[in-house]
Image: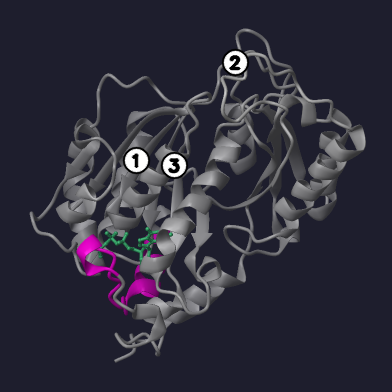
């Protein structure tokens, strides 16, 4: 954390999506990137399932099919996925756009529970770590119980075939918990950090993953963007306290810590016309009390609201808070107090804070990172992984 200078480098992230979920999440992150503050160097997606790959809106040049040339993926066979992953990891990295600028960090998105993403991610991350001197973070979804639990038969509410034509059917995955735990173990000691998103917590009670996934992916992309695009200086708006790549690195560490994200936002008056070019609009007069109240609200909900992975806050080893929005709303005192709020919630763990001015933004938001957390959900998945698959 430091005051901005002209030499400040804005954090740039390369995103690689692997497997069905990884490709869709990478797609969602790309879609969430606002034109006026780009933070992505490049987004490339890899899948064994060509049909799934072609449903993303990632340009064809950045979609890579590998392994057996068949639609439908590897059907949950993780051993096979691991073999294919080891065989192809080098080649996949070669098949990226070689002209893309070097990033400050790489984010590998993957859905844990399947065979393609979960099989390839460990080898891909290990190869990235060998080749580059930048952190390699994994963004991993955890499977929902309805994918593998006793009630997960094809007639259960969680397994409604939603829209087969769009490829959104969700077949039961009896091995999902075991696969997820096995992949997590393989990533431990290899990934710089593992950011988790728990599908179980984000799905509504009676909803199939197919119905929920686009909404979940948008939520996750928003959480990611709030944090990783924080260091951006856009259109003359300079953050008072810039969060850069080394700050993120300090907080999430390089020891495969489990990381969870929090986020909240509130729409605010911006004074500009939504329809015109805004050339004649002036910044709104913002009441200090209103700005303070908006920041207090998003910080409180960002910390105590639903996290990407539920955890006991006091177990967090480190935390990061980013407060963003239109510059006129970014009250410095309130942001500093928000950081103290995070510090007290984390029981004195090390906390960094910063602001992210968004001149074109229409909301005030808080992005929260909690690193090194312990989560009952991971314990439950490990227990489920020990049980034999339901018949
Ligand atoms: N949040 C979210 N989770 C998803 C999505 N698609 C799948 N998942 C989760 O990710 C896990 C793995 O699914 P996929 O990524 O489709 O599987 P895969 O890696 O392609 O592997 P195979 O299909 O077995 O070849 C599932 O068990 C789900 O829990 C998605 O779009 N969003």
Nearest to the observer: residue 113 or residue 338: 338
Residue at the image position 64 percent from the left and 40 percent from the top: 251
Residue segment shown in magenta: 163-185
Tell me residue 284's x, y (percent).
78, 25
Residue at the image position 50 percent from the left and 31 percent from the top: 34
Name the image quarter holding the C terminus.
bottom left
Name the residue that disc number 2 marks: 235
Q: In the visual, does 291 lie left or right of 355?
A: right
Dot 3: within a 10 Å radius of its alpha carbon, few (fewer than 14), some, or many (20 or more) residues? many
Is residue 170 covered in magenta? yes
Name the residue that disc number 1 marks: 16
Q: Reply above or below: 202 against 102.
A: below
Respond yes or no on whether mark 3 lies under 8 Å from ligand 1. no
Name the residue that disc number 3 marks: 29
N-term-proximal mark, 2 vs 1:
1
Nearest to the observer: residue 262 or residue 127: 262
Residue at the image position 42 percent from the left and 39 percent from the top: 31
Tell me residue 355's x, y (percent).
72, 30
The answer, for residue 185, to whether it is visible in the render is: no
How far apart are the alpha carbons under marks 2 and 1?
28 Å
Do residues under tags 2 and 1 come within 8 Å of each other at their CB atoms? no
| Residue found at the very far top of the displayed protein | 6
């Amino acid at each position: 954390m430091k005051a901005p200078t002209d030499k400040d480098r804005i954090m740039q992230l390369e995103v690689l999506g692997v497997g069905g979920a990884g490709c869709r999440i990478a797609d969602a992150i790309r879609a969430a990137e606002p034109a006026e503050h780009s933070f992505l160097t490049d987004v490339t997606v890899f899948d064994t399932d060509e049909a799934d790959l072609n449903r993303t809106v990632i340009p064809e040049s950045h979609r890579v099919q590998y392994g057996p040339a068949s639609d439908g993926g590897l059907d949950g066979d993780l051993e096979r996925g691991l073999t294919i992953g080891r065989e192809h990891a080098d080649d996949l990295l070669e098949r990226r756009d070689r002209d893309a600028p070097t990033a400050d960090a790489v984010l590998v998105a993957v859905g844990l529970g399947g065979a393609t993403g979960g099989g390839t991610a460990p080898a891909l991350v290990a190869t990235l770590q060998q080749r580059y001197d930048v952190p390699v973070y994994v963004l991993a979804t955890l499977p929902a119980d309805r994918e593998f639990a006793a009630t997960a038969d094809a007639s259960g509410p969680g397994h409604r075939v939603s829209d087969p034509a769009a490829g959104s059917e969700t077949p039961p995955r009896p091995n999902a918990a075991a696969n997820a735990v096995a992949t997590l173990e393989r990533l431990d000691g290899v990934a710089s950090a593992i950011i988790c998103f728990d599908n179980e917590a984000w799905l509504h009670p009676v909803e199939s993953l197919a119905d929920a996934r686009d909404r979940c992916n948008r939520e996750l992309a928003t959480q990611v963007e709030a944090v990783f695009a924080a260091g951006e200086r856009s259109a003359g708006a300079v953050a008072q306290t810039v969060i850069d790549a080394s700050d993120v690195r300090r907080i999430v560490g390089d020891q495969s810590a489990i990381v969870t994200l929090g986020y909240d936002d509130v729409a605010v008056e911006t004074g500009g016309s939504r329809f015109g070019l805004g050339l004649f609009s002036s910044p709104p007069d913002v009441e200090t009390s209103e700005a303070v109240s908006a920041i207090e609200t998003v910080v409180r909900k960002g910390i105590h609201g639903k996290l990407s992975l539920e955890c006991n806050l006091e177990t967090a080893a480190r935390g990061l808070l980013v407060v963003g929005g239109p510059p006129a709303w970014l009250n410095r005192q309130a942001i500093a107090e928000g950081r103290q709020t995070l510090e007290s919630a984390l029981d004195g763990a090390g906390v960094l804070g910063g602001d992210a001015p968004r001149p074109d933004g229409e909301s005030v938001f808080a992005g929260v990172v909690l690193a090194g957390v312990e989560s009952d959900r991971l314990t439950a998945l490990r227990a489920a992984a020990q049980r034999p698959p339901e018949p």
